[in-house]
Image: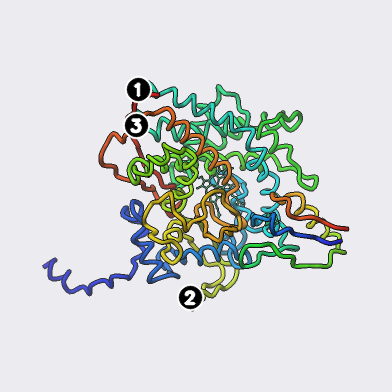
Amino acid sequence: MKVRIDLDKCYRSGECYYNHPELFEMSDDGDPALKVTDLTDAGMRLHAEQAAEVCPAGAISIEE
Amino acid sequence: MAEALQEQQPPALPNEIDPREFDGPAFQRDPFPLYKRLRDHHPLFHDRFHNRWVLSRYWDIDGAFQDNASYDRAVYKPDGPYQFGSTHVFGPNILEYGNSPQHRWLRNIVAGQFVGNRLQVFLPMVAQICDEVIATFKEAGEVELVSQFSSQVPIRVISNMLGLPRQDEDTFVGWYQALIAGLGFGGEHLARGIQARNEMWDYLDPLIATRSKTPGDDLLSRIVSAELDGARMSPDEVKGFVALLLAAGGDTTDKAIANMWFHMMYTRPDQYADVQADPNLWDDVFTEMMRYDPVVHAQFRHTTREVELHGRVIPERAGIILYLGAGNRDERVFKDPDTFNIHRSDLHMGRENRSGRYKDGKPGHLGFGIGQHFCMGYAMARQEAMIACTKLMAAMDTPQPKFDRHPGISSPSIDSGGFRSPQELVLTFNPV
Ligand code: HEM
Ligand code: SF4
């Protein structure tokens, strides 16, 4: 399972990194970045799914 | 003799800061000269008199807002954790949960109600309330904007959003005024505020019970029935949140509208002509007002560990005050910071981001805070202010301030959360 962030769509709302700091972090310019790449952990999968759901720009997607 | 004594005192250094200045009336009226001395000469000021550290530069404030590991909003007693809700006029609410997972949970349960499509459905009601309020004074050709308009609209909007019966609106306005007064001044006001809160809570109890069972489409139903990972807010948390909404969402938006009109009438009447030609520019009036002299000037944090800044060390558990109003005038960030200009090219205009970072590369205003506790009502406040100002402008032909001179915008107490606004703003106009 992989998380993808489409930085063209993302407008830097910050929702993913403030709500799921376990998985995302803010880079200096405000773009979100992934902190963790291994998503075998069930907790991390949940963070990924919730972030994809609430991203106001629809910029986060999950690939199996 | 007295003269001789005075002469013997060493002249105060021009840039030295006496902490009592923060309590004086001059600071409440015009804090900007002191802000500048802070930024230029004391970017990290240790105020021993009030037992706190003061931050005033834009990027230092941004840094504190972004650094959850070092700064927290929850308040602790020196000897242990704070007792939630026992002394706060609002009761238990999101403001007191600091950076905990509980805060994230509580915020996410309700945050979605104030943005996007959920917000859009309430906008026709906002417009209707504005029309109703404007009708109460329009034919007179004169309005005291604060008491007759700006302080009337947001509280009625919230009351309607919550789906309270319209005949209770005036009672609600009364509780609201007592709660707000109880916020900043303590003592007798605090007691009255807590009494108003209790009355309001008794009033809300049965409503919460029925709407949890049979929810409608109103905000109260949505709050009581919203679920996150299968859990709902407790009735006490619902009541604390409603009380908070009145102040965080009512009083602030109220003062934002008054400030926008003050600046259009007194600070930049030339730019009011631009806004009349293109009412969409109210959006930029809102943004520039939130930079130039925002409603809320101060936010509080305390350190959760030692923090190094400007070559000094702030100890753990130290009180921190962030002057948003000072950061917004930082000449390191904004050109001609003391000029109110809705056509600014060095400020991010339009919708704010919780991250404070924008793709146009421009800095935003600090008036809604940034980060973990970024204002939840940012979209609602902007939309509501836009509708209110546009409606009012359309009802008035050639509005003029009634008095040439105006004492200006002030606050009862910037440091105790007193919000800045004009006390009165009288306009005359020809009804349209
Ligand atoms: C122009 C109007 C407004 C101003 C100037 C304003 C200002 C602020 C500021 C500066 C904060 C940050 C607090 C912090 O950093 O600790 C904040 C938080 C908050 N605001 Fe607003 N606000 C406004 C309108 C609203 C509205 C309309 C609502 C209604 C939904 C609202 C609800 C809140 C809430 C619930 C928080 C706490 C968020 C959290 O702790 O996560 N505000 N506001
Ligand atoms: S939630 Fe979406 S829009 Fe917001 S920063 Fe993350 S990816 Fe970007």
Badge 1 local density, few (<14 within 10 Å), some, or many (20+)?
Answer: few
* 3 or 2: mark nearer the eye: 3
Q: Earlier in the sequence, mark 3 or mark 1?
A: 1
| Label 2 and label 1 in one chain | yes
Q: Quarter of the picture for ligand 2?
A: bottom right
* Of A12 and B200, the residue lying toward us: A12
Query: Label 1's element?
Result: helix
- Residue type marked 2: His
Marks 2 and 1 sit apart, C-alpha to C-alpha, by 57 Å
The three-letter amino acid code for the residue at tag 1 is Ala
The picture quadrant where one finds residue B344 is bottom left
Q: Which is more toward the observer, B86 or B259?
A: B259
**Residue B28: x, y in percent?**
36, 52
- Whether residue B366 sits left or right of residue A23 in the image: it is left
Q: How far across and down, in percent of the image, does residue B104 sit? A: 68, 53
Helix or strand or loop: what does disc 2 sit on?
Answer: loop
Q: Is mark 3 within 8 Å of ligand 1?
A: no
N-terminal-most mark, 2 or 1: 1
Which chain is mark 2 on? B
Horizontal side of B72 relative to B228 (left or right) equals: left
As drawn, B332 above or below B102: below
The earlier-in-sequence mark between 3 and 2 is: 2
Q: Are marks 3 and 2 in contact (CB under 8 Å)?
A: no
* Residue of label 3: B398
Q: Quadrant of the C terminus of chain B?
A: top left
Which residue was labeled with disc 1?
A: B140
Distance from the alpha carbon under mark 3 to that under mark 1: 14 Å
Q: Position of residue A31 (x, y in %)?
A: 66, 62
Q: CA distance from mark 3 to mark 2?
A: 51 Å
The residue where tag 2 is placed is B310
Task: Identify which residue is drawn at 50% across, 38% down.
Answer: B386
Q: Quadrant of residue B15?
A: bottom left
